[in-house]
Amino acid sequence: MGYLKSTPDAQGFFGDYGGAELPPPLVPHFKEITEAYERLAHSAEFIRDLRYIRKHFQGRPTPVSYLRNLSDMCGGAQIYAKREDLNHTGAHKLNHCMAEALLAKFMGKTKLMAETGAGQHGVALATAAAYFGLECEIHMGEIDIAKEAPNVTRMKLLGAEVVPVGFGGRSLKEAVDSCFQSYVAQADTALFAIGSVVGPHPFPRMVRDFQHVVGIEAREQFLEMTGQLPDMVAACVGGGSNAMGIFAGFIDDEDVSLHGVEPMGTSSKLGDHAATITYGKDGMIHGFRTMVLEDENGDPAPVHTIASGLDYPGVGPEHAHLYRTGRVNYSAADDKEALDAFYKLSRHEGIIPALESSHAVAFAMREAKANPGKSILINLSGRGDKDIDYVTETFGFGES
Ligand SMILES: *Cc1c(COP(=O)(O)O)cnc(C)c1O
């Protein structure tokens, strides 16, 4: 049996990781979501609707581009990019948000709820809610609201209610807690749409399956372009959804090596990075078992990276599992390398990448030199329009 069919198990475990530890009132609701998903994953109507949306609303398939100039500059391997930056709303997140919204619709729910950090997930979910005529409630820390004003504006234009979260660190972690609390009170009519391959079962599996389209397309496109499979496939890892999406397409191809790239931030000191697999240990976070970065009290540690979408002290349980089994290699790129990659891809390929995706670009630039004659396919998870003001005001325009 192929990997994807056999993993996770019925309880949502990827080896030792995953599962669901929920407050008792939420147990029946997650059971309902699991059952609905299992039914709909085989429903011809659900699959047909999702195909239609991907083609006629999202603009899929997104292309694979050969990065000729960057490959020539780095010398060595040939670098290719799967262009999720060209997906509607500018990132891969809409792949799972549209599917989660369709699931909510089939379940008879009237509302979508989620937390958001930098606002990317909130915008994607608000987009999906608008498409389906569903209500949308997004919880966001006050600090993030102040930092990410354009995304708050987008969410409001799309018709979402943005709930400011003012306790604790007033950021992503508190937004998760606040959203969970609000969800408990309205789980009969709302679906909590988690924004990555994290959270309690069935979300890690469901979001992976919804992102699998990236890997399916990329494998077919790469074969058609080159007549071969890539030697290496790489993606940045925050929660890990864009990485699982592209990895899923190649996971049974044993000759293709898979690489997750974590954010090393400014240093390897706890608090300066968000490289959970590189430096973390086994633990629990937000209702599932995985690897986590913890402080001395065993609480989720503060994290830093230039890419706010990678800013999470945990990681999807499937990544922890694939790290332990050795099927995927994990390494890290720091803020400086990501920034250099951001400038180079902009200047030499005409593609302004998201700072998150720039970590995967940085990995490819580094590995290209060491792998002459090989090919590297990266998942370019999103476009960098959201990052241009921050980057140029803080760091200027880069060297030519
Ligand atoms: C949110 C985001 C990420 C990180 O999320 P994953 O679940 O790790 O993929 C990466 N890239 C972009 C462009 C994002 O918006």
Image (spheres, rainbow, N blue to C red):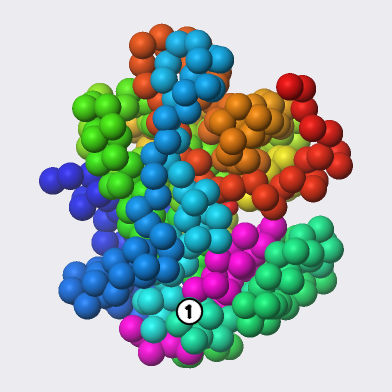
Q: Position of residue 261 (x, y in %)?
A: 53, 33
Q: Residue at x 47, y 23 (%)?
A: 68
Left or right: residue 266 versus residue 97 is: right
Highlighted magenta segment, given as a residue range: 106-128
Q: In the image, is residue 163 part of the stretch drawn in magenta? A: no
How many numbered discs?
Answer: 1
Give the camera-side residue of 223 and 142. Answer: 223
Give the quarter of the image for residue 247. Answer: top left
Q: Position of residue 52 (x, y in %)?
A: 31, 70
Residue 380 visible in the current orientation: yes
Q: Position of residue 102 (x, y in %)?
A: 38, 76
Give the camera-side residue of 97 and 268. Answer: 97
Residue topped by disc 1: 131
Residue 208 visible in the current orientation: no
The quarter of the rendered structure image containing the C terminus is top right
Circle 1 residues within 10 Å: few <14, some 14–19, many ≥20:
some
Give the quarter of the image for residue 232. Answer: top left
Q: Position of residue 287 (x, y in %)?
A: 52, 62
Q: Is residue 332 above or below residue 151?
A: above
